[in-house]
Amino acid sequence: MTQTMYFALPKEYREATGDDLKKRISLAKERLGKRAIILTHHYQRVEVVGFGDAVGDSYGLSQIAASRNDVEYIIFCGVHFMAEAAYILAKGGQQVFLPNPLAGCPMADMAEMADVMEAWKTLEEFGGDKRIMPISYMNSAAGLKAFVGEHGGLICTSSNADAAYKWGFDKREKLFFFPDRHLGYNTGIKYGLKPEELVVWDFSRDEGGLTEEQIDRAKVILWKGHCHVHTNFKEEHVHETREKYPGVKIVVHPECPHEVVKLADAAGSTSFIVKFVADQPAGTPIAIGTEINLINRLALEHPDKKIFELSGKTCPVCANMYRTTLNDLAYCLENLDTMKQIKVPDRIKANALLALERMLEVH
């Protein structure tokens, strides 16, 4: 389960105006200078991204966190598992902060360690880590990353999931992929697997709800997790959008259901989506199937293109990414000496580091 803690901003930060907060953040950044780096995920609020020293997806920001041993403080504007990963990759003595400590990830919470261990106990009867390579999406808690590292596997993001599949199949017969079934399925189909070679492990049922024959025949066993934002997008949204906007380009995240990915013009990570939009000619209508904050920011950055969210009916917002405000960032930067740091126990960190280092080597 994602770590949670009581957290309430003092009144002076809650009631500060936007202009006041911006001044305080700018002054704090100036005072800290090169001692601190602010990493901002693509899904953060536009005003928060504006203060980032780097913006990117979880893979790109992990690379930065691993390489910046010259800074004392890493302020991660994202969610808990990202800050955990930054701590695991950070050099000794570096301090990692999550401006809003309550920013978690429901998908990560779908892979409870007790359920994972119970599943692995069953899969050991099918060869365990002699035949099955565990691969976890970055959107997972540190304990799950450690499990993967301990059993020879690696972490992946939507940027390098294709490469992670190749890496895994080069070493073992099967993959055990969690926690996002849709990314795992879409990556498997792209890799060339048949639908029947991809099965879903339902952690709420005995033996994952699978027969021995299904497990034995499967090439990939997918954990039954999902992103509540990306499962908002449906097949009918694609058809309706194409009918309403002739010549529209549709790009979606691979956490979307396969029916949506199959019908889109392109699918890829948040960084891929950013590049896809930038590469389209002026005047192009572009419908995007991902989190609303990134869509809004891209619309602001490309006023020469008509950019909108794919569903047209919902507001696909990640409430946890949306938690981090300028109020939180100002408080964090001004109170680094008392703000609770993000940490991972050493016994978990060691194995999780193995899995993350393998991720950074595979692209």
Image (cartoon, helix red, strand yellow):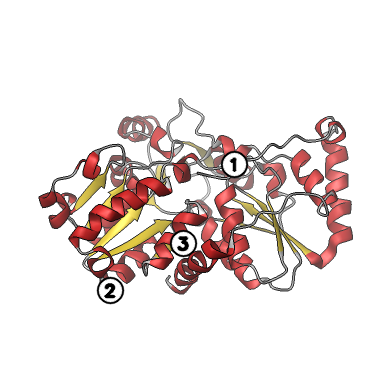
Q: Is residue 234 above or below residue 178?
A: above
Q: Amino acid at mark 2?
A: Lys
Q: Which mark is residue 321?
A: 1
**With 92 as the anchor, is 26 left or right in this view?**
right
Could you tell me the amino acid type at mark 3? Answer: Ala
Residue nearer the viewer, 110 or 25: 110
Q: Secondary structure at mark 3?
A: helix
Nearer to me, 339 or 314:
339
Name the outermost residue toward the left.
Answer: 213
Q: In the image, is residue 50 above or below residue 68?
A: above
Identify the residue at horizontal 54%, vertical 34% (top origin): 317
Report whether 19 appears left or right of 184: right
- Rendered view: 87 above or below 285: below
**Residue 193 appears at what percent x and percent y?**
20, 58
Which class describes the residues within 10 Å of circle 3: few (<14), some (14-19), or many (20+)?
Answer: many
Q: CA distance from mark 2 to mark 1?
A: 36 Å
